[in-house]
Amino acid sequence: RSADGAVELLSCATAAMKFNSAISGARRKCRKAHFTAPSSVRRKLMTASLSKELRQKYGVRSMPIRKDDEVQIVRGKFAKEPAGKVTAVYRRRFCIYIDRIIKEKANGSQVPVPIEASNVQIVKLKLDKDRKSLLDRKKAGRQGGADKGKGKVSEKDVHMADVD
């Protein structure tokens, strides 16, 4: 066999399984859908995971980010910075701005640094009635899956699966 044939075989074996046949898996179509998405869809794309305490409290893993949330940067150049409040969510650029995360330009003026929403973790939520109802719906959906036997698998379950 040629080296090209071996590489081709390897890439086919690692391809991900497709879940929804109505949505294309083609790279260029996925990229087009992502970058031409309307603001309502971008809101959903710009989600951040919740801190461990909030996860325990609300039973939800992640939430769309919004203006007055308090976030901790977990990846990138500013990861060591303390938690800050989100000052703006710029959906057109897929980024958020956080207070005290600024850089100085050559002329001395200060500008906020854009941070991607996936690189932060929500530490404190700005709650209103709509956000509370979203949390309740997401928690109900997660518990609905738990009733069907979905979710985390314990070590005991894995051990019992080997017993035959």
Image (tube, rainbow, N blue to C red):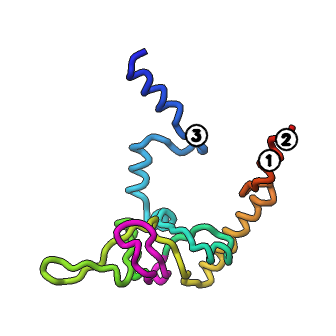
Question: Nearer the viewer's eye, disc 2 or disc 3?
Answer: 2
Outermost residue to the left: 107
Q: In front of the other: label 1 or label 3?
A: 1
Of mark 1 and mark 3, the one earlier in the sequence is 3
Side (left or right) of 50 relative to 140 = left
The quarter of the picture where residue 19 lies is: top right
Question: In the rendered image, which quarter contains the C terminus?
Answer: top right
- The residue depicted at 30 percent of the width and 78 percent of the height is 112
The front one of 143 and 8 is 8
Range covered by the magenta-colored residues? 66-85
Q: Earlier in the sequence, mark 2 or mark 3?
A: 3
Type of the residue with mark 1 = His
Give residue 149's quadrant in the image: bottom right
Which residue was labeled with disc 2? Answer: 163
Kind of residue at disc 3? Met
Taking the spot 68% from the left edge, 71% from the top edge, the residue there is: 59
**Callout 2 amino acid:** Val
The front one of 3 and 146 is: 3
Q: Which mark is residue 17?
A: 3
Q: Principal SS element in the magenta part?
A: loop
Circle 3 Cα neighbour tier, 10 Å, few/some/many (<14 / 14–19 / ≥20): few
Circles 1 and 2 in contact, beta carbons < 8 Å: yes
| Residue ID at (51%, 67%) | 47
| Residue beneath the point at 55% across and 81% down | 125
In the rendered view, would you say 151 is above or below 129? above
Q: Where is residue 65 in the image (x, y as percent from the top left)?
A: 49, 73
Given residues 1 and 87, the one toward you in this image is: 1
Q: Name the residue under label 1.
A: 159
Q: Does the magenta stretch include residue 1?
A: no
The vertical placement of 32 against 83, above or below, is above
